[in-house]
Image (cartoon, grey):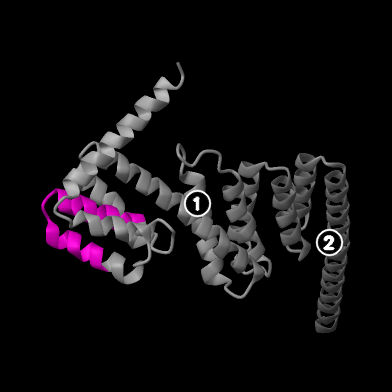
């Protein structure tokens, strides 16, 4: 009896082993089929991209990624999905695809390129920085990530150049608003804007004028020691600047008379210009 039981156990184990082998074999077949389908979808995406149908191409790349997500080609398909729409300036779609890529594949070897495309997607979508600063600020954020996380890459070099351009635009905007507040005699608001240029955009060409305007505003409101402090900073760093010459005149006793003459001359030039039309 024990002998029969032993034979039954051996048979069951054998059947179990055969069943497992069959499942493993079926899994290999399934994986082969999935990989084949993924390759097909990927190739269809490439064909669509070459024909200029980037939206369909992006869809096929997404399909390839979903078909076989454990494949090393899944991340490539995801990045291609973003790239093809970026080439035709579908900025919002590219941004969404790239953010998803960065979230799902945080250790991918092409992460630097993904961040660069994301920064460029925001940068290229800038339409009017005077009305909408968001794309400008978002692109700045991601260019800074590239510089900090991938400093040795070519993307970092271009990111630094783009950051200089972005900072110039932001500094110019702050200075423009500061001048507006000065005309309205809103001195505190003007000072805050000018200090922002000095503290955050000191590598731009607008730093010299910002320092001069701080001298000018503080002198007007009677804070001569503060005006002198900014004048010293301007003189030490930018003594050859025309703005230092302007600052030197602020401490001249006849400064207010000089400013009045300048305003008068400006009004006269405007009047002459208007008369020339008739």
- The residue tagged 1 is 138
Residue visible at 39% across and 59% down in the picture: 201
Please tell me which residue lies in front, 100 or 19. 100
**Marks 2/1: CA–CA distance:** 41 Å
Which callout, 2 or 1, points to the residue nearer the camera? 1
Depth order, front residue of 57/113? 113
Tag 2 residue: 31
Camera sees residue 197: no
Q: Secondary structure at mark 1?
A: helix
Residue 203 location, x and y as percent? 43, 64
Q: Quadrant of residue 256?
A: top left
First in sequence: mark 2 vs mark 1: 2
Task: Using the image, determine if residue 190 lies above or below residue 199.
Answer: above
Secondary structure mostly seen in magenta is helix
Q: Residues within 10 Å of mark 2 (few under 14, many from 20)?
A: some
Q: Position of residue 70 (x, y in %)?
A: 73, 63
The mark tally for this picture is 2
Few, some or many C-alpha atoms within 10 Å of disc 1 (few <14, some 14-19, many ≥20)? some
Drawn side of residue 269 relative to residue 127, left or right = left
Identify the residue at horizontal 65%, vertical 47% (top origin): 94
Say if the magenta span includes residue 210. Answer: yes
The residue range painted magenta reads 209-232
Q: Secondary structure at mark 2?
A: helix
For the C terminus, give its image quadrant: top left
């Amino acid at each position: 009896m024990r002998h029969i039981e032993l034979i039954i156990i051996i048979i069951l184990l054998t059947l179990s082993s055969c069943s497992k082998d069959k499942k493993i074999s079926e899994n290999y077949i399934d994986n082969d089929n999935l990989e084949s389908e993924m390759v097909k979808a990927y190739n269809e995406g490439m064909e669509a991209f070459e024909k200029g149908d980037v939206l369909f191409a992006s869809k096929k790349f997404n399909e390839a990624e979903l078909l076989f997500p454990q494949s090393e080609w899944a991340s490539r398909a995801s990045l291609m999905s973003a790239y093809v729409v970026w080439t035709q300036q579908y900025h919002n779609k590219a941004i969404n695809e790239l953010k998803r890529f960065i979230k799902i594949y945080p250790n991918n070897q092409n992460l630097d390129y993904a961040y660069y495309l994301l920064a460029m997607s925001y940068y290229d979508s800038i339409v009017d920085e005077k009305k909408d600063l968001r794309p400008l600020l978002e692109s700045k954020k991601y260019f800074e990530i590239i510089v900090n996380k991938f400093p040795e890459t070519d993307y970092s070099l271009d990111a630094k150049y783009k950051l200089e351009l972005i900072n110039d635009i932001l500094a110019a905007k702050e200075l423009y608003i500061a001048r507006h507040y000065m005309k309205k005699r809103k001195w505190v608001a003007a000072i805050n804007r000018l200090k922002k240029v000095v503290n955050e955009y000191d590598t731009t060409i607008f730093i010299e004028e910002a320092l001069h305007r701080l001298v000018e505003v503080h002198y007007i409101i009677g804070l001569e020691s503060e005006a002198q402090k900014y004048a010293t900073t301007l003189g030490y760093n930018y003594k050859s600047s025309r703005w230092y010459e302007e600052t030197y005149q602020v401490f001249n006793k006849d400064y207010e008379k000089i400013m009045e003459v300048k305003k008068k001359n400006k009004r006269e030039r405007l009047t002459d210009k208007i008369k020339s039309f008739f």
